[in-house]
Image (cartoon, coloured by chain):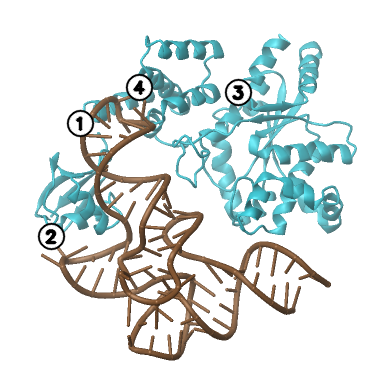
Chain colours: A cyan, B brown
Amino acid sequence: MIQEALREIQRGTAEIIDIERIEKLLKAYFDEGKTYTVKAGFDPTAPDLHLGHTVLLQKLAIFQKYGARVQFLIGSFTAMIGDPTGKNATRKVLTKEDIVKNIKSYTTQAFKILDTEKTDIVYNNEWLDELGAAGMLQLASNLTVARMLERDDFSKRYASQTPIAVSEFMYPLLQGYDSVHLASDIEIGGTDQKFNLLMGRQLQKAYEIKKQQAVLMMPILEGLDGVQKMSKSLGNYIGVTDTANDMFGKVLSISDELMWRFYELLSTQTLDEIAQLKSGVNDGSLHPKKVKEALALEITARFHSENEADTAKEEFDKVHAKSQIPTDIAEFECDGEVWIAKALLDCNIEPSTSQARRDIKQGGVKIDQEKVTDEKLVLTAGEYLLQVGKRKFAKLKVN
RNA sequence: GGUGAGAUAGUCAAGUGGCCAACGACGGCGGACUGUAAAUCCGCUCCCUACGGGUUCAGAGGUUCGACUCCUCUUCUCACCA
């Protein structure tokens, strides 16, 4: 029983520090029904979650299955500093209003995966506000500058002459202090959080709370490009609130290599099943596209419904496999005669008339399925279906 | 506080008086090929109803027929010293 739980917990992890402790906690749960706490911090800087976040959430859900109470920590205080992790520039600081606004949409999305009953939402400003300057100084005395600069992202930024604000140095300390206050048994986060997560262990020791959290790190999910981490600012993300169509299409657009990564980190298929799929693709008995479709269906169904996922697939096949026109197309209207380049701009499918001209020149623009060759074309009254490239569509009615 | 180096398009990075809307790389976009994949190949990549015009090289002034390139001040970054 414990072994099985451990296996599930270890799945897809990048690194676990102090696995013995996790084992003990599980044992206490199975033997005596004792619960324990797992902390995970979330930064309410953006209102939307994407699949990268759900990797963590799914792991938390596994823990809940095996007796954990999740401490869903909202970095309401630390958000005002801005976590430097993975950023190459100082993050802009949010106002309290922004944060409150983000939190609500954030938690509703998270509870699509987490068990509400076994989750405590906590805000770190509750205890960090109290800390005060003296508390801060005491906290800061636990860390040397040299050690701080060992951190990968700090040293990189330093080397590339990107500014680092002193306030950013406080971030790992405060995050670590959260673990002291909450007396967490386990904390999970991405590998990029290693420094911060370990700080929790170190501070728990320094503050003598008689326990040191185990640390579990998940790999960082790559974005659609397969290279950089999934993030909103890079625009390579699949959002939890994306429409079923978008979600399905986005999953299908990832590379075959990346697909296995997504399987490992996002699918609920067992590792054995995944291995089977993999060998099937390798010996040619399974088409990789079929496997990718199955993944896209699974993920889409998780955030919408199976019906919607199926519809998304049909829609997708219609548009791309048979190159027909999608069902839902944004519609626009305008008066009088319009120059084609301007029309494309007004319909938001081209960023400028210059770009529109270029695309026309290169044969990338179609009206009612017909390639446009004349870049001076003027649209007179009537209805048109405009298309740029393969995926940008718009309907325009000229009055 | 002192001294020195630096700031160029989405990013990195050339350019040190006219040949610069600015080499190159990456990214992005369009096309071919496909499985809306990846890889590869071709083209494009500031804006403007365009064989022309307008606005760009941190910001503000100045020198010059002419400045991304020279001078002055300002802002920001980095290094060394204190």
Name the N-terminal-most of marks 4 and 3.
Answer: 3
Query: Left or right of B27: which side holds B82?
Result: right
Where is residue A175, by image quadrant? top right
Name the N-terminal-most of marks 1 and 3.
Answer: 3
- The residue that label 4 is drawn on is A310
- The residue that label 2 is drawn on is A336
> Which residue is located at x 26 percent, y 40 percent?
A329
Name the N-terminal-most of marks 1 and 4.
Answer: 4
In three-dimensional space, the C-alpha distance between marks 1 and 2, rounded to whole angstroms, equals: 29 Å
Amino acid on which disc 2 is placed: Gly
How many labels were placed on the picture? 4
> Which residue is located at x 57 percent, y 29 percent?
A55
Name the N-terminal-most of marks 2 and 3.
Answer: 3
Amino acid on which disc 3 is placed: Gly
Question: Foreground residue, A377 or A280?
Answer: A280
Where, quadrant-wise, is the C terminus of chain A in this rendering?
A: bottom left
Decide: few, some or many residues near mark 4? Use Cα within 10 Å; few <14, some 14-19, many ≥20.
some
Pointers 2 and 3 in contact (C-beta within 8 Å): no
Name the N-terminal-most of marks 2 and 4.
Answer: 4
